[in-house]
């Protein structure tokens, strides 16, 4: 529930900034400040590893809203889902500690868009996550990128996605929902 209220607050603030400042370029590194709350920690009194990804969602909501992409997607009846994510931890975030969350769109391929999140303290990376997201229709099916970019505009100047990100996406992929995916342990 805690992240739900934070999400609603982030959306309200992002909409207000969008109205006041206009849309930001999709290539922008969006930044927001977050404090580790008692509901975010585990028994070791640091930010729970699973909570990082929930808090990183806040950065995506902020970026999508402030670029105007969320409004365009909503008007088309589209939404984004995370297809894969990976996170690497460098240092722990402690109860009450404030950190900066950076979020940026790093590119796309023929099936997904890729984002990066970083948790920073005093400019130092404490954790980094890579996200592979797909754009789906509320009526069913995936939105092809040519249709997506026709509706929301294609961000210019996106850097090429590094090869390891492509390798990670391929290596972590599960079969399509139209194919069986039995659980067989070898």
Image (cartoon, rainbow, N blue to C red):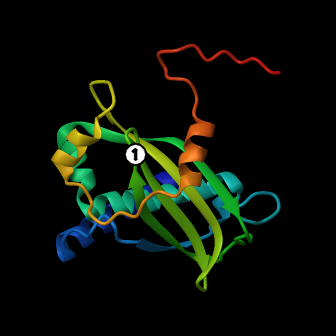
Is 42 placed left or right of 156 in the picture? Answer: right
Q: Position of residue 104 (x, y in %)?
A: 43, 65
* Residue 90: percent from left, percent from top: 73, 69
For residue 135, which quarter of the picture? top left
Residue named by callout 1: 109
Quarter of the rendering containing residue 23: bottom left
Q: Is residue 112 left or right of residue 139?
A: right
Which residue ends up furthest to the bottom in the rendered image? 122
- Relative to 72, residue 160 above or below: below
Instruction: Judge the density around disc 1: few (<14), some (14-19), many (≥20) Cα neighbours within 10 Å.
Output: few
- Left or right of 107: which side holds 2? right
Decide if residue 6 is in sight here.
no
From the viewer's perspective, is 80 left or right of 45?
Answer: left
Residue that appears at 52% across and 63% down: 117
Secondary-structure class at tag 1: loop
Task: Judge by depth and name the residue closer to the eye, 133 or 7.
Answer: 133
Which image quarter: residue 68? bottom left
Instruction: Please give the name of the residue rendered at 22% of the width and 52% of the height, measured from the top-left corner.
Output: 71
The residue drawn where x is 50% and y is 61% is: 116
> At 47% from the left edge and 51% from the top edge, which residue is drawn?
4
């Amino acid at each position: 529930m805690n992240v739900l209220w934070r999400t609603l607050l982030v959306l309200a603030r992002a909409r207000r900034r969008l109205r006041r400042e206009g849309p930001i370029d999709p290539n922008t590194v969006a930044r927001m400040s977050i404090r580790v709350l008692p509901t975010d920690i585990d028994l070791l009194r640091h930010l729970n590893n699973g909570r990082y990804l929930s808090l990183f969602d806040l950065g995506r909501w902020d970026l999508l809203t402030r670029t105007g992409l969320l409004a365009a997607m909503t008007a088309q009846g589209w939404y984004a889902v995370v297809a894969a994510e990976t996170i690497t931890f460098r240092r722990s975030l402690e109860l009450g500690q404030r950190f900066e969350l950076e979020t940026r769109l790093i590119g796309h391929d023929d099936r997904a868009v890729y984002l990066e999140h970083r948790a920073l303290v005093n400019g130092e990376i404490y954790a980094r996550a890579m996200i592979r997201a797909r754009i789906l229709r509320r009526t069913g099916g995936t939105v092809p990128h040519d249709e997506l970019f026709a509706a929301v505009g294609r961000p210019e100047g996106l850097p090429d996605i590094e090869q390891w990100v492509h390798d990670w996406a391929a290596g972590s992929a599960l079969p399509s929902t139209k194919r069986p995916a039995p659980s067989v342990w070898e």
